[in-house]
Image (tube, rainbow, N blue to C red):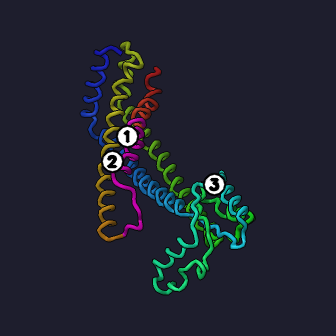
Amino acid sequence: MPFNGLLYGVVEALRSLYRNKGMSIASTGIVVITLLMLGSFMLVRLNINHVTKAVKEQVEMVVFIDENATLEERESLRANLVSHAGLAEVRFVSKEEAMERLAEIWGDFVAGYRSAEDNPLPDSYEIRPIVAENIVALARELERYPGVEKVQYGEEEFVNNLFAVLRVIQLISLALMGGLAILAIFLISHTIRLTVFIRRREIMIMKYVGATNWFIRWPFILEGLVIGSFGAALPLAALYYLYDASVGWVVSNNLLFLNLIAVPSVMLELVKYLVPLGTGLGVLGSLLSMDRFVRV
């Protein structure tokens, strides 16, 4: 598009925003409200995913080696564990190291068992699976390996229930975000369509005097871009102060177990999604809403 046409589009978009202040504010308000709701649920979902990931990273099992296992069985077990495709981390823990850990907790209560002859603890492997949900199946598989006395990973029912709850929470938050996104598209497109309908006479006059469709569309596209940009910027500012205050409250009350994502990281994610969504919806809403009026 020639520079003059671009300049005309910019000037007309600004004039239109000023002349139709009421509708411009209403359109921006709709974008702000919908993106604020969507951004709030995004904050919740991002932190739920963060907590879920942290929980899964802590899921591990312990493979206890049979005291009567031969050297060949021990070597075979080590080789099988290290080469297993489903395991992310395999760490050998000697009976001496296990006793040292126990002594740090119980102190003098285990003093009489610290010698090699009196140490009742077995050698073991601490294992972290790649996919935490597979821990039950992996434990059952590893129990069948020669040289393994038992595999400990917690109560099977508790582990299964934990992952079931996490899946349900993730699905609910995803469904809520999807519903809000659809609501945002509906509200924004209908608000912009109302704006275009109010100005249909102006559009038709421009068509009758020979203006091309894109010459007519351009100011409306820029108008939608401005509305979408403001509509994304305001919720981002509000969410920043709200989330920053929430993180500060969590820290000041020593609720660090909540493990919230750092403010810069979470805001980067919000900017990455809300800015393109706001501007994209503004532009797309303008294009779709005025299509019937430019086809005269």
Amino acid type, mark 1: Val
User: Whole-Å distance between the Cαs marked 1 and 2?
Assistant: 9 Å
Amino acid type, mark 3: Val
Instruction: Classify mark 3: helix, strand or loop.
Output: helix
Q: Quadrant of residue 202?
A: top left
User: Whole-Å distance between the Cαs marked 1 and 3?
Assistant: 45 Å
Q: Quadrant of residue 190?
A: top left
Of the two numbered discs 1 and 2 on the same chain, state the one appearing first in sequence: 2
Instruction: Classify mark 1: helix, strand or loop.
Output: helix
173 or 163: which is nearer to us? 163
Residue at 38% in and 32% down? 196
Residue beneath disc 2: 236
Badge 2 crowding class, 10 Å Cα cut-off, few under 14, some 14 to 19, many 20 or more, is many
Tell me which segment is drawn in magenta.
Answer: 255-280
Instruction: Classify mark 2: helix, strand or loop.
Output: helix
**Residue 62 drawn at (x, y percent):** 61, 67
**Residue 135 drawn at (x, y percent):** 64, 62
Residue beneath disc 1: 275
Residue 257 part of the magenta segment: yes
Residue beneath disc 3: 82
62 or 195: which is nearer to us? 62
Horizontal relation, residue 140 to residue 259: left or right: right
Residue 256, visible in the rendered structure: yes
Asked if the residue under mark 2 is in contact with the one under mark 1, i.e. CB atoms within 8 Å, the reply is yes
